[in-house]
Image (cartoon, helix red, strand yellow):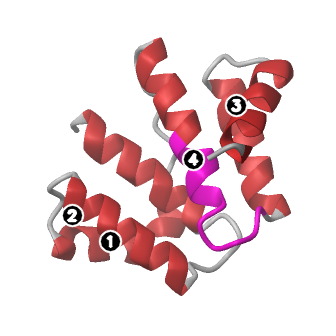
Amino acid sequence: MTTAIEHFHNLVSLSAADGKIEEAERVALSKIAYDRGIPMDRMNVMLSKANEYVYLIPQNMVDREKQLEEMISFAKVDGTFCESELNLIKTVSERLGFSKQELDQFIKASEGR
């Protein structure tokens, strides 16, 4: 699986973390899929199986940082940063090898965007 697909796969997992995929999240995922050359039919299949996905850990630190930044940004796309999304981001952050302080820095940096 390519890095772009892995990252998108993880965003789909995040979008389903609160038990539902909001319309704003679907729109954002559609744009991300388009920008990355992911066909809409593949995206729709991924959305239909979102609750079945296991988070895939990127293999290098640059991709790990990018993934964490994307997840934080995406979690805010529907206007709320709900507890289940934050919990998933915390879990992912730990799996990626980031400390709580580093995660807090990523979240704080995202507030300026």
Of the two numbered discs 1 and 3 in the rendering, the one whose residue sits closer to the viewer:
3
Label whose residue precedes the other's in the sequence (2 or 3): 2
Label whose residue precedes the other's in the sequence (1 or 4): 1
In the rendered structure, which amino acid carries the disc numbered 3? Phe
Q: Are marks 2 and 4 in contact (CB under 8 Å)?
A: no
- In the image shown, does 18 or 72 lie closer to the viewer? 72
Could you tell whether 36 is left or right of 83 in the image?
left
Label whose residue precedes the other's in the sequence (2 or 4): 2
- Mark 4, residue position: 71
32 over 5 or under it: above or below: below
The region drawn magenta spans 70-81
> How far across and down, in percent of the image, does residue 5 sit?
28, 46
Label whose residue precedes the other's in the sequence (4 or 3): 4
Tag shown at residue 30: 1
Q: Secondary structure at mark 2?
A: helix
Residue at 79 percent across and 18 percent down: it is: 99
Tag shown at residue 55: none
Tag shown at residue 106: 3
Q: Secondary structure at mark 4?
A: helix
> How far across and down, in percent of the image, does residue 61 sit?
48, 14
- The CA distance from mark 2 to mark 4 is 18 Å
- The CA distance from mark 4 to mark 3 is 10 Å
Q: Is residue 17 magenta?
A: no
Q: Are marks 2 and 1 in contact (CB under 8 Å)?
A: yes
- In the image shown, does 69 or 48 lie closer to the viewer? 69
In the rendered structure, which amino acid carries the disc numbered 2? Tyr
Please say whether residue 22 is visible from this viewpoint: yes
Q: Are marks 4 and 3 in contact (CB under 8 Å)?
A: no
- The CA distance from mark 1 to mark 4 is 15 Å
Tag shown at residue 34: 2
49 over 4 or under it: above or below: below
